[in-house]
Image (cartoon, rainbow, N blue to C red):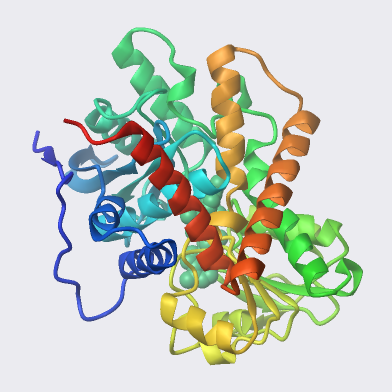
Amino acid sequence: MSNEVLMSINHTTRDLPSHRTALDDAREQLAEAVDVLCLSPAVHEMLAASRREVRVSIPLRRDDGSVEVLHGYRVQHNNSRGPCKGGLRFDGNVDLDEIRALAMWMTWKCALLDVPYGGAKGGVRVDPRQYSKAELERITRRYTSEIAPLIGPNHDIPAPDVGTDEQTMAWMMDTYSVGRGHTVLGVVTGKPTSVGGSQGRQQSTSRGVVTIAMESLHHIGIEPSRATAAVQGFGKVGRIVARLLHEQGVRVLAVSDISGAIRQEDGIDIEKLERHVDATGGVDGFDGAHRVDGADVLAADVDLLVPAAVEGVIHAANVRSVRAKVIVEGANGPVTADADRVLAASGVLVVPDILANAGGVVVSYFEWVQANQSYWWSEAEVNDKLVARMSQAWRVVTAYAKERGISLRLAATCLAVERVYEAHTARGLYP
Ligand code: NAD
């Protein structure tokens, strides 16, 4: 099988395409932090480079007997602070650069929240909606076998991301365990609770996003009960964000997903919308609201905007239509670096992904700790610890930003990069 292992420890910057990518943005954010922290060019180069990149081929026997070959990746960006950690994405647009960017953001996210991990990310270029459950299982198992030499509870620990879920993680854990000859619960997180998943993991990213959203509204002096919101994406993150915002008394006026976009002036009934999505597969056609354009959700005149779908959705061409006072990044990289500058100049508070959506990796860490100890915590215990960590990170980032007069994104990135740099310095260079 053609597993091309690209050991890119000495990876050098490639010629970049003329259009900007998530990786361009991730590198630009790192460069800004390196400037603020006055780190040397050599350190900058080390922090920018992935430690390991693997590309795998996944031959798939389809249900009709035909065979097609899919492509997958696993990138381990940095492991100075501990095992690598990061999600697995199934999406038709996955490519190596996207996975590199997401892996780098995972390194900063884990460092910022002070969980003892480095950063990684994986992906398979496949649109899961076009494949049966049996086919998705075969894709997952073959991908897991191909990357098995790189993952493990002390090496690299995958978790769900776009297009994957707790069932995907159960298949990964089972495949890895069969290869080892014994059950290894700690190899992935985001598993079902029946096989070592943590209470509260499914809601954790969204609970973290909403904790940060509440802090942000408080920061700009808006009571949740008077606040309005729009949410892009109604998947694992966006759906529960909408539900928890509703529970906090925030009126969610607009929601979108890949099927369409809807708006309701007096607030969408989220419970009813969830039932509609369960029955039809998307928000489109929900009869409690008007159908609008997807762009209208990003441009909604609301206090709070939560992009919770994919990266690069708020960019140079549409950023001037944004009317929200606060953007809390539920997704990774939803605001491009160009758009970020425009938003900062117009006084919109942007809470960066590496802070806002870190609740998932925090509870993944709790799950890994529980699995390694075979000792399970209650949901209340998990949620309390999660909220405490998120609020603490919010306080640290906002204080750092205020002290230096910089954006929350730059503050968060600086804090994270500094921690990775400290770990790197303590360990020294080998050989
Ligand atoms: P998901 O696959 O469960 O849901 C994605 C949602 O986005 C779906 O509702 C889909 O229809 C929608 N979508 C896709 N393209 C869209 C578009 N162009 N416009 C509107 N909606 C669109 O994925 P998820 O796990 O909810 O992840 C969403 C984002 O959150 C990603 O950026 C992911 O990396 C990030 N994230 C996820 C987790 C997690 O624990 N799942 C943790 C941290 C960050």
Q: Toward the viewer: 409 or 137?
A: 409
* Residue 75 in picture, x, y percent from top left: 29, 45
Query: How many labels were placed on the picture?
Result: 0
107 sits to left or right of 47: right
Q: Toward the viewer: 41 or 8?
A: 41
The answer to whether residue 274 is visible is no
Quarter of the figure with the N terminus: top left
Q: Toward the viewer: 233 or 116?
A: 116
Q: Toward the viewer: 140 or 109?
A: 109
- The image quadrant that residue 188 belongs to is top left
The answer to whether residue 277 is visible is yes
Relative to residue 64, is residue 181 depicted above or below?
Answer: above
* Residue 182 in picture, x, y percent from top left: 39, 8
95 sits to left or right of 340: left
Q: Residue at x 60, y 20 (%)?
A: 370
Q: Residue at x 72, y 22 (%)?
A: 377
188 sits to left or right of 405: left
74 sits to left or right of 298: left
Q: Residue furthest left?
A: 2
Quarter of the figure with the C terminus: top left
Relative to residue 48, is residue 254 depicted above or below?
Answer: below
Q: Residue furthest top?
A: 181
* Residue 291 in picture, x, y percent from top left: 66, 81
Relative to residue 347, is residue 2 depicted above or below?
Answer: above
* Residue 117 in picture, x, y percent from top left: 45, 36
Q: Residue at x 78, y 69 (%)?
A: 219
